Amino acid sequence: MLGRNEEALRRQRDVYFGFLKLKGDQYRDTLREANNYASLLKRLKNFEEARSLLRKTVAVARSVLGKNDSLALKLRALYAEVLYEDPAATLHDLREAVTTFEDTERIVRRVFGGAHPITAGMGKALRNARAALRAREEAATGDVSSGFASLAIVL
């Protein structure tokens, strides 16, 4: 918030790697700090490093915490966000983001119910990822006019 992003990134990296060294990658607090670190990487548009960290962390979280755990779900959603918000995302990345959001949204709806704020946020993120995918697919096929309509949904 103070604009000292590089300092914040260094500190968050130190916290995450400190937990990793002290407790290992299967400790809930380490997974939480991985989420915090990846969130900051995403905010700073370091999508490649965030994606790499989350690929490993999501698998560990699902294995250790279970697929219905709120932190495991949050990590999956963050991974999907990193995929679709990356300007360099491929069509494959966008499709993976949509598939990840669809699966995660189903679990969130079952675990938390349709009225929960997490469920509403997940639904919005899924719509945005689908719109980004649609826009990219339409741009790839040359249908520019409908691509602009899809982009308007994302904004």
Image: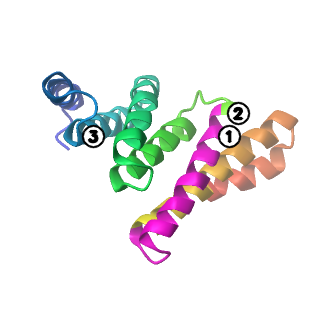
| x then y, percent, for residue 125 | 53, 55
Label 2: state its secondary structure. Answer: helix
Q: Quadrant of the C terminus?
A: bottom right
Q: Nearer the viewer, residue 16 or 30?
A: 30
> If you read the primary sequence from the N terminus, does the residue marked by circle 3 or circle 2 appear first?
3
Q: Is residue 98 magenta?
A: yes
- In magenta, the rendered stretch is 93-117
Magenta span main SS: helix
| x then y, percent, for residue 71 | 34, 50
Q: Nearer the viewer, residue 81 or 55?
A: 55
Asked if labels 1 and 2 touch by Cβ distance under 8 angstroms, the answer is: yes
- Mark count: 3
Q: Residue at 57% of width from left, 40% of height from top?
A: 84
Residue under label 1: 95
Query: Image quarter for residue 93?
Result: top right
Q: Is residue 3 above or below residue 74?
A: above
